[in-house]
Image: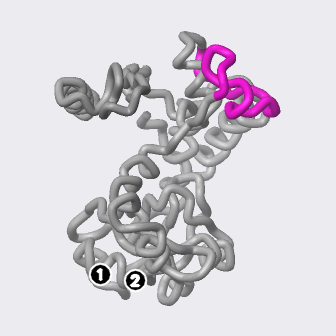
């Protein structure tokens, strides 16, 4: 668990205790003859620890810096053991797939882009939210149905970051028809990424917004690789000079 998610981590521990008490996990879990233990480890909240090998390094008590691959975690992972690193969204959707079947899950979306996705919608919308929707939903429908539409109406839209701050901005002209899935966003020269949708209306100063994102990445750089460590500093300096704005991070 990231340190920022303190309550979530505490709630997870409560659920683990309940599962132990019910015999669902632990010694002879569910009467299976197998032992299955679950532990919560609290990290320091580093962004880079979203990368699986950096997460493993942190779990081992080292600095959160990605490993060279190969070897991959499936061969040599935590403490040298074969390790599966699962995204929390994968774990969250697994019970529904087990109950209803893979065909049910694959019925959402379209070919090569099947299933559901957790979309986080923030920025200049009327009701920011996180929602589970089917893949390939049109971006405009996603924003209008779940986030109350763009602040000031769709015509006030400037652009959208469709998949988190590391994915390219798509302009209003593309936002009108683009679908929220892997293939269509690649066609739009962006990416689905983590499906964290950041909406920007016409009041947005795009250079300042990008400078703020670069500042975040500069702060979160683990410092291991030169292009990121040195490049973020240069990018940030150039953007601030272009905008003539002091840093606020």
Q: Label 1: which residue? A: 144
Give the vertical position of 237 relative to 126 (above or below).
above
Q: Main secondary structure of the magenta part?
A: loop
Q: Secondary structure at mark 2?
A: helix
Where residue 184 sits in the image (x, y, percent)?
61, 79
Picture quadrant of residue 108 = bottom left
Residue drawn at x 52%, y 53% as measured from the top left: 165
Nearer the observer, 123 or 109:
109
Q: Which residues are magenta?
A: 63-82
Residue drawn at x 48%, y 79% as measured from the top left: 109
Residue, far right: 70
Residue drawn at x 52%, y 18% as measured from the top left: 59
Does residue 92 appear left or right of residue 106 in this picture?
Answer: left
Residue, far top: 61
Q: Secondary structure at mark 1?
A: helix
Q: How did the renderer colour the structure?
A: one colour
Give the vertical position of 77 relative to 178 (above or below).
above
Q: CB of mark 2 within 8 Å of CB of mark 1?
A: yes
On residue 140, the disc is 2
Give the vertical position of 37 relative to 61 (above or below).
below
């Amino acid at each position: 668990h990231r340190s920022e998610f303190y309550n979530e981590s505490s709630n997870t521990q409560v659920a683990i205790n309940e599962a132990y008490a019910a015999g669902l996990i632990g010694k002879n879990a569910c009467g299976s003859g197998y032992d299955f233990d679950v532990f919560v480890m609290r990290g320091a909240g580093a962004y880079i620890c979203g990368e699986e090998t950096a997460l493993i390094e942190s779990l081992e008590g080292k600095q959160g810096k990605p490993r060279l691959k190969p070897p991959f975690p499936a061969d040599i992972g935590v403490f040298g053991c074969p390790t599966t690193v699962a995204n929390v969204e994968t774990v969250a959707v697994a019970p529904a797939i087990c109950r209803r079947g893979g065909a049910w899950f694959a019925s959402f979306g379209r070919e090569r882009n099947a299933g559901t996705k957790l979309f986080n919608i923030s920025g200049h919308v009327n009701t920011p939210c996180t929602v589970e929707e089917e893949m390939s939903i049109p971006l405009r429908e996603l924003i209008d149905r779940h986030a109350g539409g763009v602040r000031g109406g769709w015509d006030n839209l400037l652009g959208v970051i469709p998949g988190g701050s590391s994915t390219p901005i798509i302009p209003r002209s593309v936002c009108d028809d683009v679908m929220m899935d892997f293939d269509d966003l690649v066609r739009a020269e962006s990416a689905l990424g983590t499906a964290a949708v950041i909406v920007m209306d016409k009041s947005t100063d795009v250079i300042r917004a990008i400078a703020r994102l670069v500042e975040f990445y500069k702060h979160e750089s683990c410092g291991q690789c030169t292009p990121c460590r040195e490049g973020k500093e240069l990018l940030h300096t150039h953007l601030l000079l272009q905008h003539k704005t002091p840093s606020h991070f």
